[in-house]
Image (tube, rainbow, N blue to C red):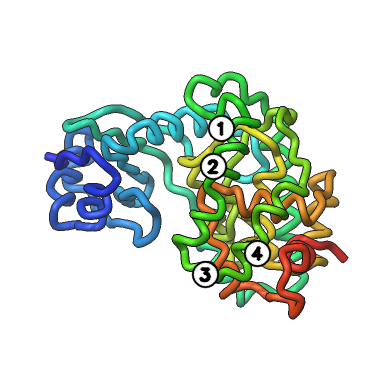
Amino acid sequence: MLPPVETDEEGDVVVPDETVLRGGVEDLCARLGFAGASLSRFPDGSQPVYAVGDEHVLKLFPKASAQRGVAEGRVLTHIQGRLPVPTPRVRDVGACENGWRYVLMSRLRGENLARVWDRVPRGRREQLVTEVGDTLAALHSLDPDPLGDVLGPEDWGAFLDRRSACAVEQQRAHGLSAAWLEQIPGFLASIPLPRAPHRALLHTEVMQQHFLVDPDDWRLTGLFDFEPAMIGDRAYDFVAVGLFVTRGDPDLLARLTRVYGHAFEPSELLAYTLLHVYSDLPWYLRHMHVPAEGTLLSLAEAWFGTA
């Protein structure tokens, strides 16, 4: 039986502990018709995810995150066959003991793009970002209204206000230095983000880590992890694009945005970087180029500028 997990803090203890989860996962697999199937846990992700045999993936959500399971199942069903890159096909969704939920889905083929990026030739990198741009354009063109009962926020302007109010403290908690912290309020106040943008379905974590690729011809073979999907301003999706796909390469970002059909102001994208739910500016500063000027405006150009 899967153990009770009532809070995020309990989840931090239980979810990583395979000795606690394994028996319950095996029991659930048997109930789903996969008794005796090979079961292998993927090493990444905030939720427990397992390969079930060669064809299926089982993703679990404890009670504290159960609504995310509902959302992911709905989003995957909504986008099925509507993007130029394959996404997991939902096989089953449901609830089980102690408030847990599950999504059983098809397994995508390919290697994780983040793990093979250093091996990708420059010309193939250009092709890959072209495919990412096509995929984002298709995603953002879909009508998000059928998902409005499971995805938020209801009011984008109110969301921005909440994120702005905690932006400094969030970065302080991550260990950001005072020299950067003191710039945040003024920078955010200077960027006029739309409070009622055209509503788009957002992945929110468009990262190399969430794409699969065929290493024989370097074409995308899958996009996954729609658990944190939202409805809001499409620019919000380009935070992860700039940080984790094009990685501050202006030529790659320019190519991607040309294919997408719209380019965003670097300052707008850095503002959304600071407001992002999972924003961790100290981590980005350690892994991205930091200009000598040491200003947020210089970071915006370095990370989100185009050639």
Amino acid type for the residue under numbered disc 4? Trp
- For label 2, the SS is loop
Q: Which residue is mark 2?
A: 87
Residue at (60, 44) in percent of width and height = 164
Q: CA distance from mark 4 to mark 1?
A: 23 Å
Q: Which residue is mark 1?
A: 80
The tag on residue 269 is none
Amino acid type for the residue under numbered disc 1? Gln
- For label 1, the SS is loop
Tell me where residue 50 appears, x and y as whole percent. 31, 51
- For label 3, the SS is helix
Of labels 2 and 4, earlier in sequence is: 2
Q: Nearer the viewer, mark 3 or mark 1?
A: 3
- The answer to whether mark 2 and mark 1 are in CB contact below 8 A is yes
Callout 2 environment at 10 Å: few (<14), some (14 to 19), or many (20+)? many
Of labels 4 and 1, earlier in sequence is: 1
Judged from this view, the residue extending furthest toward the right is: 307
Taking 23 as reference, is 160 above or below it? Answer: above
Q: CA distance from mark 2 to mark 4?
A: 17 Å
Q: Is residue 132 visible?
A: no
Q: Which residue is mark 4?
A: 218
Of labels 2 and 1, earlier in sequence is: 1
Tell me where residue 132 appears, x and y as whole percent. 69, 52
- For label 4, the SS is loop
Q: Is residue 303 left or right of residue 29?
A: right
Q: Quadrant of the N terminus?
A: top left
Q: Is residue 299 visible?
A: yes
Taking 227 as reference, is 149 above or below it? Answer: above
Q: Which residue is mark 3?
A: 115
Amino acid type for the residue under numbered disc 2? Thr
> Dividing the picture into quarters, in which one does residue 155 lie?
top right
